[in-house]
C-alpha cells in the first residue's frame, strides 16, 4: 500500500525521521509492502511546501539544513497557517511535531483533531495533547477509523505504550518509578565529578541536550508531564502535569551530591506514581537511591522506568543515550503500526 505523509514541524526530530524513512524505504517495501511519498512539510522558520504527487525528501533536507525556504518545492500556494496546511496537504498520515505547550497542549491538539477529522492517521512526539486531550483524541480517532499514536512522547522510541497496548493484555499497572528526564540525569552525573550546577547545565546546553532556558528540565516540568502522560494512558486516570507533586534539582549542591556518593548512594530526579483506587499519587523529586536500586547505575542521558503490575513482578525498560534518531524511530514505528493495524 502507498501512503502520503505530511510533516508538521521539521526540526531535529522531523529531519531525523525523514532520514530514517529514506534509509528504511526498501525495507518498508520488502517487509511490510509499505511505500510512501511526502505530500507536505510545514516548518516554523523555513516556510512550507505542499505537493500531492510527492516531493523529494532529500531536497527538502538540503534546503532546510542550508537555511533556505521550502517554498520552491511546493506545487500549491503557500498555506496561511498550520490548519490550512493540514486541510490542503492531502496526506494519509500526519507527523505532528510542533513545540510542546505544557499548560494547554495547544495548538497541537487542534492540529491533531483536524487531521483525524480529515481522515489522517496521526503520530506525534508532542506530550501536550496526551495529558490534555488523550481521551477526546483517541475517541475521535476511533470514530473516524484512524489511529492516534504517540510512542515517542516518553523515553523516545522505547516501546512503553505499545508494550501495554499490544503485549500485556489484561495487566493492570499499579505503580511505576524511574528516571525519565535525561537532561537532569546528565547534570547530576557531571556534578558527581565536581562540576557546579551552572557548569553542568552549560555543558548540557553545549551538546544540545538542554535548552537555552533549562527551567523545563531542571525544575521538573518535563518529568512531570511525562508522569502525567504515563498515568493518563497506562492507568486510565486523567492527570495534568500541574497535579504532579514537583520539585526540581536546583537545591542540590555539589557538597550534597558528593556526600551521597561517599555513602555509596546517588541523587536522582525520581519520577513515580502509585494507584490508590480510582486516584493516583504522582511525584517528581530528587531522591537518594542506594546501590541496590535499579536507578543507581543510570548515568548521563540514560533513562529507565520500572513498572509494577498486578500480574507480573517488576518490569523495567532502559534506554541509553537517546537523541533525535531514537525519537524518530518511535514515530516511524507508530506509522507502521497505524497503517498495518488499520
Image (tube, rainbow, N blue to C red):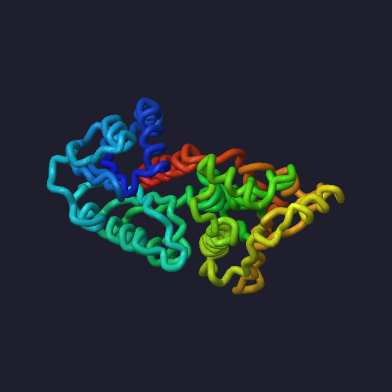
The residue drawn where x is 54% and y is 45% is: 205
Q: Is residue 173 left or right of residue 331?
A: right
Q: Nearer the viewer, residue 123 or 218?
A: 218
**How many numbered circles does the render carry?**
0
- Residue 55 lies, with reference to residue 197, above or below; the image says above
The residue drawn where x is 51% and y is 46% is: 156
- Residue 224 lies, with reference to residue 12, above or below; the image says below
Q: Is residue 153 visible?
A: yes
- Residue 160 lies, with reference to residue 234, above or below; the image says above
Quarter of the figure with the N terminus? top left
Q: Is residue 306 left or right of residue 235?
A: right
Q: Nearer the viewer, residue 132 or 60?
A: 60
The residue drawn where x is 20% and y is 47% is: 90
Q: Position of residue 39 (x, y in %)?
A: 23, 41
Q: Is residue 234 visible?
A: no
Q: Nearer the viewer, residue 145 or 285?
A: 285
Q: Is residue 25 left or right of residue 87?
A: right
Q: Position of residue 37 (x, y in %)?
A: 26, 36
Which residue is farthest bottom? 278
Amino acid at each position: 500500500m502507498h501512503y502520503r505523509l505530511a510533516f508538521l514541524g521539521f526540526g531535529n526530530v522531523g529531519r531525523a525521521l525523514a532520514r530514517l524513512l529514506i534509509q528504511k524505504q526498501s525495507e518498508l517495501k520488502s517487509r511490510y509492502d509499505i511505500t510512501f511519498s511526502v505530500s507536505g512539510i510545514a516548518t516554523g522558520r523555513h516556510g512550507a511546501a505542499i505537493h500531492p504527487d510527492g516531493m523529494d525528501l532529500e531536497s527538502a533536507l538540503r534546503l532546510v539544513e542550508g537555511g533556505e525556504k521550502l517554498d520552491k518545492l511546493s506545487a500549491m500556494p503557500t498555506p496561511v497557517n498550520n490548519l490550512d496546511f493540514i486541510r490542503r496537504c492531502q496526506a494519509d498520515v500526519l507527523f505532528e511535531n510542533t513545540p510542546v505547550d505544557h499548560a494547554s497542549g495547544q495548538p497541537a491538539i487542534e492540529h491533531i483533531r483536524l487531521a483525524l477529522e480529515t481522515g489522517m492517521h496521526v503520530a506525534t512526539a508532542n506530550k501536550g495533547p496526551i495529558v490534555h486531550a488523550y481521551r477526546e483524541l483517541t475517541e475521535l480517532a476511533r470514530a473516524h477509523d484512524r489511529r492516534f499514536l504517540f510512542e515517542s512522547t516518553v523515553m523516545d522510541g522505547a516501546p512503553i505504550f505499545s508494550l501495554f497496548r499490544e503485549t500485556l493484555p489484561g495487566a493492570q499497572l499499579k505503580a511505576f518509578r524511574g528516571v525519565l528526564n535525561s537532561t537532569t540525569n546528565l547534570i547530576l552525573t557531571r556534578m558527581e565529578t565536581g562540576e557546579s550546577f551552572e557548569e553542568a547545565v552549560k555543558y548540557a546546553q553545549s551538546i544540545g541536550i538542554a535548552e537555552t532556558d533549562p527551567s523545563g528540565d531542571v525544575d521538573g516540568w518535563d518529568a512531570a508531564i511525562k508522569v502525567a502522560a504515563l498515568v493518563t494512558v497506562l492507568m486510565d486516570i486523567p492527570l495534568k502535569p500541574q497535579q504532579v507533586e514537583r520539585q526540581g534539582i536546583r537545591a542540590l549542591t555539589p557538597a550534597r551530591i558528593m556526600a551521597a556518593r561517599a555513602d555509596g548512594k546517588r541523587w536522582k530526579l525520581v519520577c513515580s506514581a502509585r494507584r490508590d483506587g480510582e486516584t493516583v499519587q504522582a511525584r517528581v523529586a530528587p531522591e537518594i537511591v542506594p546501590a541496590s536500586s535499579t536507578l543507581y547505575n543510570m548515568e548521563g542521558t540514560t533513562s529507565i522506568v520500572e513498572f509494577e503490575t498486578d500480574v507480573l513482578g517488576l518490569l523495567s525498560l532502559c534506554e541509553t543515550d537517546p537523541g533525535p534518531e531514537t525519537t524518530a524511530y518511535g514515530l516511524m514505528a507508530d506509522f507502521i503500526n497505524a497503517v498495518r493495524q488499520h
